[in-house]
Amino acid sequence: MRQIAYADDCNNHISTNIVSKSQKPYIWRINFDKLPLFSGLHYTLYSGSLGLAGSVEVDGCDINRKNRMGNTPLGWAAESGREEVVRILLGRDDIDPNKPDDEGRTPLWLAVRNGHQGVAKLLLGRDGVDPNRPVEHGGTPLWWAAFRGYEGVVKILLGRDDVNPDDPDRSGYTPLSGAAIGGHEGIVKLLLERDDVNPDKQDHFGQTPLWWAAGNGHEGVVNLLLGRDEVSLDKPDRTGQTPLSRAACNGHEEVVKLLLGRDDVSPDTQDGSGRTPFSCAAENGHAGVMALLQPATPTPHNAP
């Protein structure tokens, strides 16, 4: 079998120029004609040349070598959703399935961020993969799957005993907070079914999942959180804004109705600037919310 020098750069090879101009990722920020980008091995795996990747020997090549952008071949294949290529690479004894790129992103993290469920399954089936390893700037694979709304990936991760479903990122946002921010009701349901998830956990800014859901107008998620006794409905963040205040400021009438229907929600709580939900709604021109919050005018005693 003919040996191919996988470790050599092939940025000037005609096949690389063709594929680099036909693939969408990175096109808008990389000049392939001037910047050496990846080795022959990276090109073969990224372009999805399964027969070549599976049949040609790679003697003298470090299968875990990073390219000039800091990506390993496995990381590149995982990020691109090349499921069969990932399977081939994971079949090698010398592959490091948990090796991060220069930004601390593991192959699993890259697969999860892009919703590649099949690739995530393959990686999680391999020893040495840490399912809780966050990216350098924060956020575990579960956090990103919850935030982006990849319900299938979330189910896979929650099915593992070694995954922490309440692990926050560097700002204190939990996977439940991430799902609440995005309004992903199915994922919120999955997380609320777990006994090891705190549905009222505050981040570093004092914001709870309910605070985020209310502020972003996600009525369905608010309803789910209102059904939990552990959730404090009037808990303010560090600026003094409650979930009701946040919903009122942003003009989310249906959420305001839901919160006002609860006896344990105060409609007149002032934030750190002295604004009530009503005054905040008025400041932002939300007449519908103002009507909901406006107290009824008392009837004069001498009225007929």
Image (cartoon, helix red, strand yellow):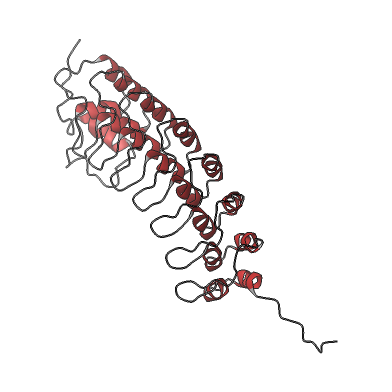
Q: In which quarter of the image is residue 238?
A: bottom left
At x 36% / y 48%, what residue is drawn?
Answer: 169
Residue sitting at the far right? 304
* Drawn side of residue 203 relative to residue 285, left or right: left
* Drawn side of residue 223 relative to residue 45, left or right: right
Q: In which quarter of the image is residue 175?
A: top left
Which of 121 and 265 lies nearest the eye of the viewer?
Answer: 265
Q: In which quarter of the image is residue 273?
A: bottom left
* Drawn side of residue 33 relative to residue 157, left or right: left
Which of 248 and 21 lies nearest the eye of the viewer?
Answer: 248
Quadrant of the image containing the C terminus: bottom right
* Drawn side of residue 5 relative to residue 141, left or right: left
Residue 134 location (% of width, % of height): 33, 41
- Against 40, residue 167 (above or below) is below
Residue sitting at the far bottom? 302
Residue sitting at the far top? 1
Which of 234 and 250 lies nearest the eye of the viewer?
Answer: 234
Residue 118 location (% of width, % of height): 43, 28
Which of 81 and 273 lies nearest the eye of the viewer?
Answer: 273
Residue 2 location (% of width, % of height): 18, 12
Quadrant of the image containing the N terminus: top left
Residue 154 location (% of width, % of height): 47, 36
At x 20% / y 34%, what residue is drawn?
Answer: 67
